[in-house]
């Protein structure tokens, strides 16, 4: 199974289109908020199952603030992250993931990629496709690959 994980597109679709093309076939799409109305576009262009949550800039959105679901046997908790003060660090969102029994926690908001795989939990942020804040300022996204019975593998990709 291949999962494309993105965040913070802020209604700008050009880099999302590039990430979709570069990723190739995917089985699941995850957007971690600040889609700013882009959920309609995503629903039109992404042909697989989708999970999209509301970010702090998704005013008047009907999207959920958080979701819990399974990818294979892995329990996943997704949220934008602003309600867990991720700008100050991932500690609070990690604790929330542990409390929920999640194997994987995904968040956005900081516009910086982050990946920490520990034995009990993986915490990640794909960064931002539209407004990256990390050194080099290239839009970023992640792909998760999960083989049957295997440990998920994550890789961060940067747009040129």
Image (tube, rainbow, N blue to C red):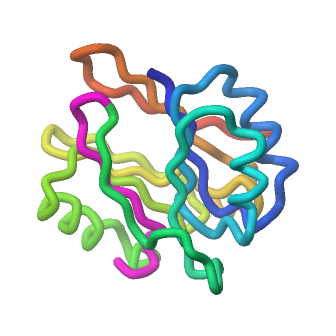
Residue at 67 percent across and 33 percent down: it is 47
120 w.r.t. 38: above or below:
above
Q: Which residues are magenta?
A: 72-84
Q: Is residue 71 left or right of residue 45?
A: left
Residue occupying image coordinates x 73% and y 34%: 20
Q: Nearer the viewer, residue 135 or 75?
A: 75
Q: Is residue 14 magenta?
A: no
Q: Position of residue 81 (x, y in %)?
A: 43, 71
> Relative to 34, is 91 on the left or the right?
left
Quadrant for the N terminus, please.
top left
Q: How many marks?
A: 0
Residue 31, how many percent across, how many down? Answer: 57, 53
Tell me: residue 3, above or below residue 104.
above
Query: Quick one: 71 or 47, which is closer to the camera?
Result: 47
Residue 57 position in % (x across, y down): 64, 80
Q: Please provide percent x and percent y for residue 100.
A: 16, 60
Q: Quadrant of the C terminus?
A: top right
* Direction from residue 105 to residue 108 in the image, left or right: right
Q: Say which residue appears at 63% left-offset and 85% top-offset.
A: 60
The picture quadrant where one finds residue 145 is top left
Could you say which is closer to the camera, residue 129 or residue 136?
129
**Residue at the extreme bottom of the image, as rendered:** 60
Q: Nearer the viewer, residue 119 or 63?
A: 63
Which residue is located at x 81 percent, y 41 percent? 17
User: Where 49 sits versus 109, above or below?
Assistant: above
Residue 70, picture quadrant: top left
Taking the view exactly as shown, the residue that stands out farthest to the top is 148
Left or right, 33 with respect to 151, comes to right
In the image, is residue 79 part of the stretch drawn in magenta?
Answer: yes
């Amino acid at each position: 199974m291949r999962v494309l994980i993105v965040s913070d597109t802020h209604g700008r679709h050009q880099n999302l289109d590039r990430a979709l093309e570069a990723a190739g076939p995917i089985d699941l799409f995850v957007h971690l908020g600040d889609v700013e109305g882009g959920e309609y576009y995503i629903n039109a262009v992404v042909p697989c199952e989708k999970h999209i949550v509301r970010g702090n800039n998704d005013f008047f959105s009907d999207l959920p603030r958080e979701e819990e679901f399974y990818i294979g046997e892995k329990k996943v908790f997704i949220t934008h992250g602003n309600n867990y003060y991720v700008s100050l660090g991932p500690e609070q969102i990690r604790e929330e993931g542990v409390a929920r029994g999640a194997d994987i926690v995904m968040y956005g908001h900081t516009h910086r990629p982050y990946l920490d795989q520990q034995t009990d939990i993986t915490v990640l942020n794909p960064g931002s496709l539209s407004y990256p804040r990390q050194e080099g300022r290239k839009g970023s996204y992640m792909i998760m690959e999960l083989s049957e019975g295997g440990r998920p593998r994550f890789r961060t990709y940067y747009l040129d």
